[in-house]
Amino acid sequence: MRHITLLFIIVFCLMVPVKISAEHMVTVKLVNYIGNTDELNIKVEGEFFTLDPTLKLQKGVNYTLQSRKGELFLKQKGEKEQRIGVGFILVPQTYDMNHIVYINDRPYLGAMEFLIEDKKNIRPVNQLPLEDYLKGVVPFEVFSSWGLETLKAQTLAARTYAVSKLEQVIDDTIRFQVYGGYEWDTSTTQAVEETEGEVVTYDNRLIETFYSASNGGKTENNANVWGGDSMRYFPIKDDPYDPTHPWEFTLQKTQIDYEAIDFSNPAWWDTTVEKDEEIANSLKSWLNRNGYPGKIKILEIDQFELNGDKLASGRSVTGSISVIFMRQLLEGLILFEQMSLNDVNLNQIRPMIGGTVFKSYLIDSLEQHKSAYTMKGRGFGHGVGMSQWGAHYMGEQGKTYREIIDFYYPGTTIMDISSVVLKIGS
């Protein structure tokens, strides 16, 4: 078993990411499964110590950690509450699979720091070796039931990305990579172990290993999605392995018939609902985040269209949308408003509709009917780099993970991390 080193303890306590030859360390804020909360349930298995000689958690005992007025308080059932202060660190006596920190019943390996964020929320920060971090990432980024070669390709993409972020404190959401802690799967663990230390490079530098669920049968160049320099290993080309994943959705123009609302009913606001509830909820969240606070009811989508030419990949770029809505600020105070985006990049419109509905920019048609709009497209995600479904079918056809990497990141080389870790770049 690997033993936690004094360097690991000191560096973690200072919250500075480390680069050590034996074990590269990853520092990750836990957000995805915790959210913003002022209370957590904690339990440890194995011996852990802290820098506070008065603070020691007993193994197997359930604790409640609370944040109040900018300080942390630890409570064990039947015992007196202990005031901790602004934060504390749990460090395993030995780093192994028998030393576990449970947060709201989800297990984590390694050291854990608990901080107060935004003066009220408790934010755990986990630090553990890179390879074990990956074992908690890969099963949450791809189906563990897929073939081993596909899982290895996903592992290389995840490892390359993680190494490029070693100098940062990342989080466990899709903003970086989904990380589920010590909830490992046998197949994905095997994929990580059999490719240990392998990363994808171009000219001896780490690449940006972008990937999406499905490219719809056509890959995309990075510059067309995020701007910046066009990378040679992200060409626009046909993908015969991707199953295309056709999708469509219909959006009603009139979400709520204003003339049909019974304003004499005291509960009219709560009983009035939109026709397309999922999309309407996404629109409301977007409006709340973009300058329209308060409760909202979507009345009408009076414009929704695509504008301009398509990219070489066939993906649409710009569009327009207009939303008419009611907004409740105070009891009895209702505003009638309209928000319009005209000829803007579709990456501003897609989040309004919702990425699980408006799945990609590879759009085959947007038809306007008398009472509704119908959009049809292919793929799921940005289409840059590896298609996870395409990689799955490549594996099914007997392709190795090296062949999968070569197809989706052409011109790249697989190297050992020790050769490139100090040359991080795109």
Image: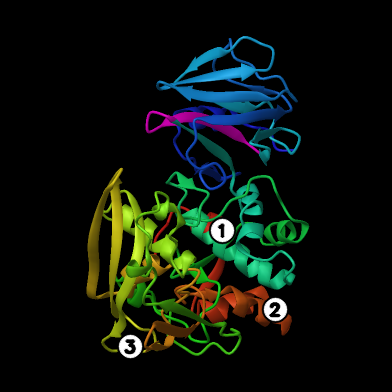
Q: Tell me, yes or no, if residue 409 can be seen here.
A: yes
| Residue 328 is covered by the magenta coloring | no
| Residue 113 is covered by the magenta coloring | yes
Looking at the image, residue 249 lies above or below residue 143: below
Which is closer to the viewer, label 3 or label 2? 3
Read off the magenta span: 109-120
Q: Position of residue 271 (x, y in %)?
A: 46, 56
Q: CA distance from mark 3 to mark 2?
A: 32 Å
Of the numbered discs in the image, which one, if any, rests on residue 395? 2
* Of pointers 3 and 2, the one earlier in the residue sequence: 3
Q: CA distance from mark 3 to mark 1?
A: 34 Å
Q: Regarding mark 3 in the picture, which secondary structure is present there? A: loop
- Tell me if mark 1 has few (under 14), some (14-19) or many (20+) residues whose alpha carbon lies within 10 angstroms of its own: many
Which residue in the structure is indicated by mark 3?
Answer: 310
* Of pointers 3 and 1, the one earlier in the residue sequence: 1
Which is closer to the viewer, label 3 or label 1? 3
* Residues under numbered marks 3 and 2 in contact, where contact means CB atoms less than 8 Å apart: no
- Tell me if mark 3 has few (under 14), some (14-19) or many (20+) residues whose alpha carbon lies within 10 angstroms of its own: some
At 47% from the left edge and 82% from the top edge, which residue is drawn? 219
Q: Position of residue 390 (x, y in %)?
A: 60, 80
Which quadrant would the N terminus be assigned to in this image?
Answer: top right
Looking at the image, residue 101 lies above or below residue 290: above
Q: CA distance from mark 2 to mark 1?
A: 19 Å
Q: Tell me, yes or no, if residue 416 can be seen here.
A: no
What number of labels is visible? 3
Between residue 176 and residue 253, name the one nearer to us: 253
Q: Residue 77: name its quadrant.
A: top right
Q: Position of residue 118 (x, y in %)?
A: 37, 33
Which quadrant would the C terminus be assigned to in this image?
Answer: bottom left
- Tell me if mark 2 has few (under 14), some (14-19) or many (20+) residues whose alpha carbon lies within 10 angstroms of its own: many
Which residue in the structure is indicated by mark 1?
Answer: 159
User: Could you tell me the amino acid type at mark 3?
Assistant: Lys
